[in-house]
Image (spheres, helix red, strand yellow):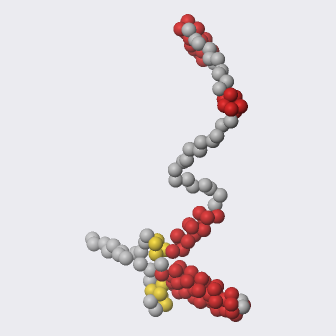
Amino acid sequence: MRQEVPQFIDVEDKIFGPFTFKQFLYLGGGAAASYIALKLLPLIIAIFVIPIVAGLGVSLAFVKINNRPFIVVFQASIQHFTSTRLYLWKKRSIKKEISQSQQEELEIVIPQKILSTNKLKDLAWSLDILDNQK
């Protein structure tokens, strides 16, 4: 029995002429936002706002970066800039100037106990006994 395998499943259907439904919504939303900005804002401010809004609508509809829709990249960039994480490429070592008094404080030597082999065996034996009692 022969089965048909669907092909071109990643291609969206063209519903409104040469545009897909998403492209039509992005372009219509950009046009509507531009019209609202023209009517509500003073002309001097609207001249600067309309190209930004219209450009965003066109970018959302047609631009792909690394074969990913612009909306995915735009959302990731907004999330990156609003997050509180600190992304470091390479860790830098910071050398601070140490004053003479601070250097003397750092040079305090802590005496270390030297364990002989007999003391070390006794310590290991006592630890083994305590572990076996539990």
Tell which of 1 and 16 is nearer to you: 16
Quadrant of the image containing the N terminus: bottom left
Tell which of 92 and 68 is nearer to you: 92
Is residue 34 depicted above or below 75 in this figure?
below
Point 52% across, 70% down: residue: 73
Point 32% across, 74% down: residue: 4
Location of residue 39 in the rendering, given as x and y in whole percent from the top left corner: 70, 93
Side (left or right) of 82 relative to 67: right
Location of residue 29 in the rendering, given as x and y in whole percent from the top left corner: 60, 85
Quadrant of residue 116 within the rendered picture: top right
Is residue 18 depicted above or below 68 in this figure?
below
Point 53% across, 8% down: residue: 117
Q: How many marks?
A: 0
Quadrant of the image containing the C terminus: top right
Quadrant of residue 75 within the rendered picture: bottom right
Q: Is residue 26 visible?
A: no
Location of residue 5 in the rendering, given as x and y in whole percent from the top left corner: 33, 73
Quick one: which residue is furthest to the left in this view?
1
Location of residue 113 in the rendering, given as x and y in whole percent from the top left corner: 62, 14
Side (left or right) of 34 relative to 63: right
Is residue 4 depicted above or below 55 in this figure?
above
Q: Is residue 42 visible?
A: yes
Point 45% across, 86% down: residue: 14
Quadrant of residue 40 within the rendered picture: bottom right
Side (left or right) of 5 relative to 127: left
Quick one: which residue is furthest to the front in this view?
100
